[in-house]
Image (spheres, rainbow, N blue to C red):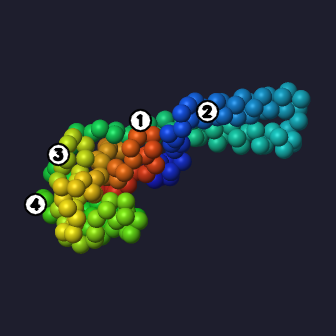
Amino acid sequence: MDEFISIIQFHTAIPFGYLLFSLVWISILVWALKNIVSNIWAKKFHEPSLYIAVSLLIVAISYAYASAKYSENINMNPFFNESSLVGEWNYGNSELLLSSDGTAKISLSSSLLARLNIDNGEGYWRKEGDFNLLIGSASANFASKSGMLRVIQYAENYRLIIEDYDDPDMWDGSLGFKQKNM
């Protein structure tokens, strides 16, 4: 369910994009409420516009609820220790195994490998700054900042997302890697 909620979130880096989205969303709510009230007032209970308006109102309220839950559950700047990241992480069919000695076993899909600019196989990891995790493969220069992941917290669990966006508004909202057995 968390993955579905993260997928339906609206993200944009367009100037005033969130304002425009909010205006469209409010316009849909007003249109739906107006049609519901007018159809009920006129006692037109079998009109298609009533069913469309009720459906849109339910979708809009559900979306607002999901967005509020998503926002309250996400922490983009959690405090964490390196020891809490040790273990197996999964993201779709990709796996990342982080050992306590700083070594990693990397088995990622080709699209994730391209985004991280690393190779599958044996590698290394370390905490970088306050919220980042740097992973490197044997063929990648560990000091190059390739393989940058950001540690976030969603619903009390740490998640690893690929930090290949320049602006937080450009983040696609994907919750990324989830620690196995959490």
Inter-mark Cα distance, 1 to 4: 34 Å
**Residue pointed to by mark 2:** 20
Q: Nearer the viewer, mark 3 or mark 2?
A: 2
Asked whether the residues under the numbered discs 3 and 4 touch, taking CB atoms below 8 Å apart as contact, a structural biologist would say no
CA distance separating discs 2 and 1: 23 Å
Can you give x and y, in whole percent of width and height, for residue 14 in the image? 54, 38
Specify few, some or many for label 4: CA neighbours under 10 Å numbering under 14, 14-19, or 20 or more.
few
Helix, strand or loop at disc 4?
A: loop
Q: Please tell me whether mark 3 or mark 1 is closer to you in this view.
A: 3
Circle 1 residues within 10 Å: few <14, some 14–19, many ≥20? few
Whether residues under marks 4 and 2 lie with C-beta atoms below 8 angstroms apart, the answer is no
**Residue under numbered circle 4:** 101
Residue most extreme to the left: 101
Query: Which tag, 3 or 2, sits closer to the chain's start?
Result: 2
Under circle 2, the secondary element is helix
**N-terminal-most mark, 4 or 2:** 2
Q: Residue at coordinates 88% horizontally, 36% vertically from top-left?
A: 44
Element on which disc 1 rests: helix
Residue 48 at x, y percent in the picture: 84, 44
Q: Amino acid at mark 2?
A: Leu
Please give the label number shown on residue 81: 3
Residue type, label 1: Glu
Q: Which residue is mark 1?
A: 72
Quadrant, the C terminus: bottom left
What residue is shown at x 34% (from left), y 57% (from top)?
Answer: 177
Disc 3 marks a residue whose amino acid type is: Asn
Image coordinates for residue 108, horizontal then vertical, percent:
33, 68
Q: Earlier in the sequence, mark 1 or mark 4?
A: 1
Mark 3–mark 2 distance (CA, rounded to whole Å): 40 Å
